[in-house]
Image (cartoon, coloured by chain):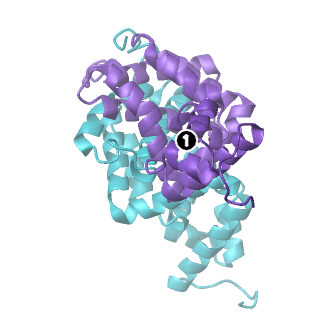
Chain colours: A cyan, B purple
């Protein structure tokens, strides 16, 4: 254990000490109660260095969970685009993350721990609320925007659970394009549809 | 431990010994490789007694998982009914199970263990394939009937995970009728809709 004297300079060791302090903080205090400032203090670095290495709390959380940077940055770009066709783009983005072996492992770990441990669930709640709901819901321009985004999340998490975790056939080996064709209209209706749309057609 | 002499007569102790043998068999050999006959042999009872107490392998699995009998019997009745409006009836049935405190506990345990342990996942795969896919898919009269049923399952499992396990707001405290209105058309499209239906309306 290093003596508590002054702040660390920049460098890989600094990045690691920030990650380590963040991991402890997210696990003990939760996502919402953790700030970049408190992590900087725990890691004994200047808060500007935390921003320099990780940009935002959401990015830092993704790094702690070993999720790829693209998860937060590409998601932001996706959300900033046209609302038209967003359901299909979200379906493709999400499935591509789970299909890639480097991303599937960390996502599996995150899903498993959130389902099994209340602390991990609380951290995921905070992250989703900040990185996903906070960015996407206002873009929908609907009074129930936040509910709509969580409905999108429910369909995506459910597909991930049955296809990649429990591995129920024929969903587990269905080809990606078939899944996108099924899922995109569901997601698009949740995002921008009339709540009653599809009720007549579906019967 | 009782000596291995002859078969047990009927009675509550017999029912318990069947449950105990079934629990061991499902956990070690999995759902598919376990038969009512092998459970009867392990419990040293007449196979007719297993059928007498539990009717079917699906019912016995539900009993081992401490799921209520209605899960299998009402599901069968639901599936046997009209395909029209089935999406809404399935949504109501599923959410009602999770809302009832006596059912939510066992369902939570089943979901958590299936997500965390491969053996539990395998048992769930077999149960779902037998009790759900085996009964519902043929009723849909579609070449991709089994995929459609697993898509229904994906939406339901996802709602359960975000609403009751991870507890993400506002999904966690949305009222039931609002959820049914959102979910029913999704489920109905998966069950009986044209794969492309909703693509135009949703954009």
**Is B20 situated left or right of A57 in this image?**
right
Q: Identify residue for label 1.
A: A134
**Is A41 situated left or right of A148 in this image?**
right
**Is B129 situated left or right of A178 in this image?**
right
Location of residue B165 with respect to B95 vertically, above or below: below
**SS of the residue at dot 1?**
helix
The location of residue A37, given as percent across then percent down, is 68, 65
Q: Residue at x 33, y 27 (%)?
A: A185
Residue B52 visible? The answer is yes
Residue A114 visible? The answer is no
Q: Quadrant of residue A23?
A: bottom right
The location of residue A109, given as percent across then percent down, is 52, 61
**Front residue (pair A22, A139):** A22
Q: Residues within 10 Å of mark 1 (few under 14, many from 20)?
A: some
Location of residue A145 with respect to B117 vertically, above or below: above
Instruction: Point out the residue furthest to the front here.
Output: B6
The location of residue B5, given as percent across then percent down, is 67, 56
**Front residue (pair A113, B173):** A113
Q: Residue at x 26, y 33 (%)?
A: A181
The N terminus of chain A sits in image quarter: bottom right
Q: Quadrant of residue B111?
A: top right
The location of residue B92, given as percent across then percent down, is 57, 20
Q: Residue at x 37, y 10 (%)?
A: A203
Q: Residue at x 43, y 45 (%)?
A: A162
Q: Chain of mark 1?
A: A
Number of on-image labels: 1
């Amino acid at each position: 254990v290093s003596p508590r004297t002054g702040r660390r300079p920049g460098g890989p060791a600094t990045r690691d000490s920030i990650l380590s302090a963040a991991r402890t903080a997210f696990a003990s205090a939760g996502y919402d109660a953790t700030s970049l400032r408190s992590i900087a203090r725990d890691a004994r670095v200047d808060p500007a260095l935390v921003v320099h290495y990780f940009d935002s709390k959401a990015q830092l959380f993704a790094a702690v969970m070993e999720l790829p940077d693209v998860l937060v940055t590409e998601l932001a770009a996706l959300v900033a685009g046209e609302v038209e066709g967003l359901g299909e783009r979200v379906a493709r983005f999400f499935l591509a993350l789970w299909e890639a072996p480097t991303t599937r492992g960390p996502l599996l770990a995150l899903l498993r721990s959130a389902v099994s441990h209340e602390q991990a669930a609380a951290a995921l709640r905070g992250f989703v609320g900040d990185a996903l709901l906070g960015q996407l819901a206002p873009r929908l321009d609907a009074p129930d925007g936040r509910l709509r985004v969580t409905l999108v999340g429910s369909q995506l998490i459910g597909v991930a659970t049955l296809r990649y975790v429990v591995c129920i056939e024929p969903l587990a080996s269905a080809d990606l394009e078939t899944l996108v064709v099924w899922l995109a209209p569901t997601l698009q209706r949740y995002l921008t549809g009339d709540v009653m749309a599809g009720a007549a057609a579906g019967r």
